Image: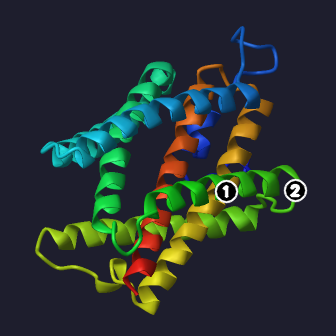
Amino acid sequence: MSFFKSGNPTLSESRFKDTVINQTGSYEDTMTVNGTLQKFGFLFLMLMGTAFYAWKEVLGGGDNAQTMIYVGAFGGLGVAILMMFKKEWAGYLAPAYALLEGLFVGAISAYYSSAFAEVAPGIVLNAVGLTFGTAIAMYLLYNFKIIKATAKFKAIVITATAGIAIFYMISIALGFFGITIPFLHEGSAIGIGFSVFVVALAALNLILDFDMIENGAALGAPKYMEWYGAFGLLVTIVWLYLEILRLLSKISKK
C-alpha cells in the first residue's frame, strides 16, 4: 500500500494500516470522508472557542499570555503524542487537543496583532483569510484531480517536510544557547523566500491529508479513525496558519 503515505506524521501509513478491518467486517461502523470532515468542523469550532478566549485575555492586558502559550503548545503536543499511540482514544483526545491548541493559537495571534498594530494592523485577519482560502483551494485542486497524490509527489513532500521539521528542531535547540538563525525571523529576501517555501509545503501537505482520509475510508478503517483523521487535518491547518502569519510579519518588516 505505497499510496498510504502522508507528510503529516499523525496521518502516516502505520496509523491507519493497523486499524483497517477486513472485508467481512469487525466493526459495525466504519470511517467515512463526510464523518471525518464533520468532526474536523467540530474540532475547529472548539479550537476557535479557546483561541478567542486567549485572544481577549492577552489583548485585555492579562499577564497569563506566556502561560497560555506554554500550556497550549506543550499540552497539545503531549496529547498529540498520546493519541498517536492510542488512536482508539481519539474521540476524547482530539477535542482536548483542539482546546489546548486554541490557547496557543489565540495567544500567539494576539502577540502578532499587538506587535504589528502600526505597520500591519490587519495581520491576523489576513492570515486567517489566506489560510481559509488556501485550504479551500487545495481541497478543490485535490477533489477535481488537478493535483494528484502520486507516489513521486508524496515522496517529495514527505522528504521536504521532514527536512523542515529537523531544521526547526535544530533552531529550537540553538535557541537554548542564545544562537538564532537570522533568516528564520528577518524580513530579508532570503527570509521571505524561506517562509514562502514552508507555506507552500504546508499547503501541499493538505493534499496528502485529504488522500489519506479518503483512502482510510475506502479501506474501511474503524469509526474512531474519523476523529484521528480530523485531528491530523487540524494539525496541518494550524501549521499553515502559523506559517502564513510568520510570512506576513516578515513582509511587514520590509
91 or 2: which is nearer to us?
Answer: 91
In the foreground, 40 or 109:
109
* Location of residue 196 in the rendering, given as x and y in whole percent from the top left corner: 54, 76
Callout 1 secondary element = helix
The amino acid type found where label 2 is placed reads Lys
x 60%, y 69%: residue: 200
* x, y percent for residue 221: 69, 26
SS at badge 2: loop
Residue placed under numbered mark 1 in the picture = 133
Q: What's the residue type where badge 1 is placed?
A: Gly
Q: Quadrant of the C terminus?
A: bottom left
Q: Which mark is on residue 145?
A: 2
Q: Quadrant of residue 220?
A: top right
Left or right: residue 66 compared with residue 186: left
Give whichever of 22, 49 is nearer the camera: 49
- Spot the residue most to the top: 28
